[in-house]
Amino acid sequence: MRRSTNMILCCLVALCCLAGAGEAAPTPYSWETLSPAQQQALQSVQGNWDSLPAVRREQLVRGADRWLSLKAPERERARQRFSAWRRLSPEKQEQVRQNLAQLRNLPPEQQEAIRQRFQEFSRLPEEDRRRLRQQWQSLPPETRRQLLNERRNVNIRRPMLRR
């Protein structure tokens, strides 16, 4: 008797589990589960949201959350940078992606040295930056390659071009 009671209880539990399995659980990152702020940030993809893979939806939600955490001046700067990115040709965009991949493959101390040199360059007056760019571009390609290779092999900081 006890054995049949246990068997009946197990069957009932199994049936309950199966009955619950048929109910539709909310899809991770379904449009309805997003906050109004997230929906507004992602409104450009609302029309095809349901057809996006779950991984892509998760990436977009994380991006929306980062966007929402920015202060107004940071958002404006991001808008300007995105606009500049969209104006680049596909070839230039690919070159930027390749450069970034190369940077990520460098040791952290070399990455930091490059970032510091870029910041120093960015702080120069526009006229000096323009002149340095012209100087660099006027060099023969082989000379530029040689300078870049030397630069990679030397760990000390020094100006690339003399003023």
Image (spheres, rainbow, N blue to C red):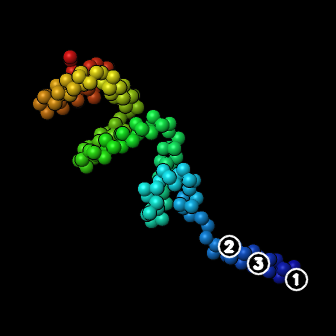
Relative to 64, residue 57 above or below: below
Residue depicted at x 21% and y 26%: 130
Q: Tell which circle, 1 or 2, labels the residue nearer the N-terminal end.
A: 1
Out of 141 and 120, give the one closest to the viewer: 120
Q: Tell which circle, 3 or 2, labels the residue nearer the N-terminal end.
A: 3
Q: Tell which circle, 1 or 3, labels the residue nearer the N-terminal end.
A: 1
Spatial CA distance of label 1 from label 2 is 29 Å
Residue 116 spot, x, y in % from top left: 36, 25
The quarter in which the N terminus is drawn is bottom right
- Residue 150 lies in quadrant: top left
Would you name the residue on which mark 3 appears? 12
Spatial CA distance of label 1 from label 3 is 17 Å
Residue that sits furthest to the right in the current view: 1
Would you name the residue on which mark 2 appears? 20
Question: Which residue type does callout 3 highlight?
Answer: Leu
Circle 2 residues within 10 Å: few <14, some 14–19, many ≥20? few
Relative to 20, residue 43 above or below: above
- Residue 133 lies in quadrant: top left
Q: Is residue 135 left or right of residue 92?
A: left
Would you name the residue on which mark 1 appears? 1
Secondary element under disc 1, as helix, strand or loop, is loop
